[in-house]
Amino acid sequence: MVLKNIIFDWSGTLVNDLPPVMGATNFTLRKLGKKELSLDEFRADFCLPFTDFYEKMAPGCDLNQLEVWFHEAYIPLENTVHALDHAEDFLQFVKSNQKRTFLFSSMQRQHYESLLERIGFDQYLDHPYLGIVDKKERIGELILEHQILPEETLFIGDMVHDIETAHHGGLHSCAVLTGYTRLKELKDSEPELIVEDLGVLRELLTAADWSWNTVLERNSKPK
């Protein structure tokens, strides 16, 4: 069965916003009296839902105050966010093959919309779901609302939470190494496929004529 629906994560999958997010997170940690994280520590420790991350770092913290601190630091850095290599080419490839596209992201709508003038990916994304705290809690809503068949649907993301969400919804899963999470943690989450970037995934889908089973048959599952 060929893929008919593609669900994209945003951060680390389509755009590189790791530096400003890490910067704003470290600003928030300083406000909490906690140690800043190095890049490797951040990629090892940061997780979604973000509430779980902050509860681990500072149990009992005021989540509303965290939001204020985070956005205070993030907004001045927002102009450093840029599209990842191969992202627009892949989006064009998906749309030219008449696949339905979905964005499923924890990114707040105001931040997403502020990027659209520079990164106009909204033209390729049919159904944006934004500001999602726990994707596993919301994936069923997307499936039911659009009556998608899980076996025809691929979820692409860069974090363990994305892969867990795909598993939770019974969807196919592909992890990309362009974002927040290291290879080890992604392997442990057991995606069906891990690729270096969306350029590689495009080549695999082209060669398989969008048959996901064929992609998996030709590319061994990560160990």
Image (cartoon, helix red, strand yellow):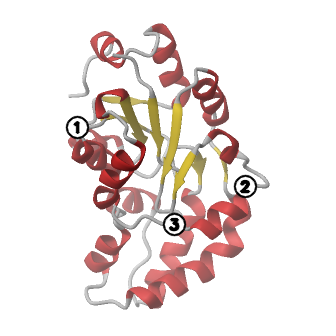
Q: Which mark is residue 73?
A: none
Residue sitting at x 37%, y 63%: 46
Name the disc covering residue 116, or none: 2
Q: Earlier in the sequence, mark 1 or mark 3?
A: 3
Q: Residue at x 58, y 60 (%)?
A: 19
The CA span between labels 1 and 2 is 33 Å
Q: Earlier in the sequence, mark 1 or mark 2?
A: 2
Residue 20: give x, y in percent of width and height. Answer: 60, 65
| The C terminus sits in image quarter | top left
The alpha-carbon separation of the residues under discs 1 and 3 comes to: 25 Å
Amino acid carrying mark 1 in the image? Glu
Q: Residue 109 vs residue 120: left or right?
A: left
Q: Nearer the viewer, mark 1 or mark 2?
A: 2
Three-letter code, disc 2: Leu
Q: Residues within 10 Å of mark 2 (few under 14, many from 20)?
A: few
Q: 97 or 19: which is nearer to us?
A: 97
Q: Quadrant of the N terminus?
A: top left
Determine if residue 60 is in view: yes
| Residue at (50% x, 41% y) in the render | 178
The residue tagged 1 is 190
Q: Looking at the image, is mark 3 or mark 2 earlier in the sequence?
A: 3
Identified by mark 3, the residue type is Met
Residue 22 is marked as: 3
Circles 1 and 2 in contact, beta carbons < 8 Å? no
Q: Nearer the viewer, residue 154 or 204?
A: 154
Secondary structure beneath disc 1?
loop
Tell me residue 117's x, y (percent). Answer: 79, 55
